[in-house]
Amino acid sequence: MRYELYYWPTIQGRGEYVRLALEDAGATYDDVARGSGGTGAMMQMMGQGPTPAFAPPFLKAGKLVIAQVANILLFLGSRHGLAPKTEAGKLWVHQLQLTITDLVAEIHDTHHPLGPSLYYEDQRAPAKKRSEEFWNERVPKYLGYFEGLLGANGGSYVTGRRITYVDLSLFQIVDGLCYAFPNRMKAFERKIPGLGALHDRIAARPRIKAYLDSDRRIAFNEDGIFRRYKALDE
Amino acid sequence: MRYELYYWPTIQGRGEYVRLALEDAGATYDDVARGSGGTGAMMQMMGQGPTPAFAPPFLKAGKLVIAQVANILLFLGSRHGLAPKTEAGKLWVHQLQLTITDLVAEIHDTHHPLGPSLYYEDQRAPAKKRSEEFWNERVPKYLGYFEGLLGANGGSYVTGRRITYVDLSLFQIVDGLCYAFPNRMKAFERKIPGLGALHDRIAARPRIKAYLDSDRRIAFNEDGIFRRYKALDE
C-alpha cells in the first residue's frame, strides 16, 4: 500500500515520528504537502471525510484517514513489525509512546509557555523560566525513566530484543534535544548512556541512515518542536 | 474481573476519565489509593512489574498493568462496549481521545504555564496570559471541533448513535470548564449547544448519575486539572 502522509512541509515537528516509522519500515509514501500541491493540498484534505483530523499530522492508508501521532504509530506498528503482536505488548508500547507524546508537548512548551498562538519573541522571559524547570525537573524524570527501562531490558531496545516505534521516537527525542539544547545536553548526556547508544544504533540502521542522509529529512529549524534558542540553553 | 485503579486519592485529575468509563460500564473496581493503603500503596506499585507507569493513573486488570489515560480507555472500550468493534472505528475513537488528552494538557497549563513543578502562586501573571490565549484561541478551536462532529452525526454522540468513552470524557471537559471558568463558560456556552446537551445527557445516565451523587465522585478542587481561580476567569 502506498501511504499519504499529511504534515507541514518545512518542519520535522510531530510528523517526524511518523516519517521515521515509515522510513524504517521501508514503506512507500508521499509526503503530500512537500509535493506540488503544498500545504493547500493538506488543508483541503484536513476537514474532509468521516474522521477529520483536529490537526496534522494525519495518514491516509487506503480508505482510512488516521490522525494523532501515537494513533498512527499504533496502526503502523502492527502492520510493519514495529510493535509486538500480543495485546499486552501492543498496550505497553503504546503506553510508552503516549509518555513520549507528553514529553514532546513539554518540549514545545519550553519555547511556548504562554501557548501555541503567540510568538516565542512575545514570551522570552517565561520561556527561560520554563526551560530551567524543564531541565531541572522534567528531563531527568522522563529520560531517567526510559534509561531505566533500557537498563532493565539489557540495553538493546526499550522493550527488549526487538525494535519498536518507541525506539525510533526516542532517537528523535535525543537527536532533537542535542540540536535544541547543545550545552545542557552535553552536561546531561553522561546520565543517559543507554539512550545515547540507542540513538546511535538507530541512526546506523541502513534505512534510517539513508533517510537521514537524504533530502527527505528536513533539517531542524526554529519553526519546529526542537528550537535552538541560545537564551534557553545557558 | 475486579479492576484496580491507581490514582491520586484527593483529586479527579486525569484519573477521572478512567473512573467515568468504569462507572458507566458498571465495572467492579477498587480505587486503591482511596482505600486503607492510601497513596503509599499506589507509589509502591508504580515502579513495579514489566510495564511500570511513568505517572498515575494506571489500571491493573488481571496480570496487565496499563498506564496513560487514553491507553486505559482503549483497553476498557473494547471490553465494555464503549468503543466500536472495527479497527477503523477503534482508531477513530482513540484519535478523538488523544485530541482530548492534548486539550487536558492545555487546560492544566492555564494555571501552570511555567511547568508542573512550580506552584500556581509562583506563576500568576503568566497563568493569566496563558488563560487569555487559551480562551481566545484554543477553546473555540477544540470545542468547535467536537461541536462540529456532534452536529455532523446528528447530535446524539460524537461518533454517531452509540456512546463511546469519548462522550464520557467530553462530559468531564464541559463539567470541568464550567467549574473552573464559570464566567467565561457562561459567555461561551451558547456556541456549543450540542456539547451542552451531550453533557446533560451523560449526567442523566443512570450509572453516571448514581456515581456523581455518590462519595466516589471527588469534588472539584484547586489541586486538580480544573481549578477555579478568580483571576483566570475574568
Image (cartoon, coloured by chain):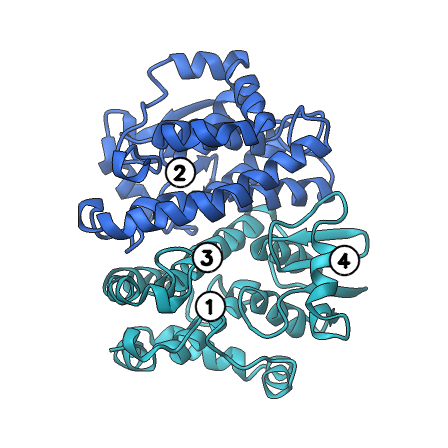
Chain colours: A cyan, B blue
- Label 4: few (<14), some or many (≥20) within 10 Å? some
* Residue A76, horizontal then vertical, whole percent: 67, 59
Tag 2 and tag 3 share a subunit: no
Q: Earlier in the sequence, mark 4 or mark 1?
A: 4
Please determine whether, in this image, residue A202 is positioned above or below residue B201.
Answer: below
Determine the residue positioned at 49% across, 72% down: A223
Which picture quadrant has residue A182? bottom left
Please determine whether, in this image, residue A4 is positioned above or below residue B5.
Answer: below
Read off the residue under disc 3.
A117
Relative horizontal placement of residue A99, taking residue A207 as reference (left or right): left
Read off the residue under disc 4.
A61
Determine the residue positioned at 35% across, 38% down: B225
Q: Earlier in the sequence, mark 3 or mark 4?
A: 4
Of labels 2 and 3, the one closer to you: 3
- Label 1: few (<14), some or many (≥20) within 10 Å? many
Tag 3 and tag 4 share a subunit: yes
Which picture quadrant has residue B92? top right
Relative horizontal placement of residue A230, taking residue A19 as reference (left or right): left
How far is disc 2 from disc 3 in space, using C-alphas?
25 Å
Read off the residue under disc 2.
B14
Tag 4 and tag 1 share a subunit: yes
Residue A225's mark?
Answer: 1
Tag 1 and tag 2 share a subunit: no
How far is disc 1 from disc 2 in space, using C-alphas?
25 Å
How far is disc 4 from disc 1 in space, using C-alphas?
26 Å
Q: Secondary structure at mark 4?
A: strand
**Does the CB distance between marks 3 and 4 fall below 8 Å?**
no
Determine the residue positioned at 36% across, 21% down: B217
Residue type of the residue flagged with mark 4 = Ala
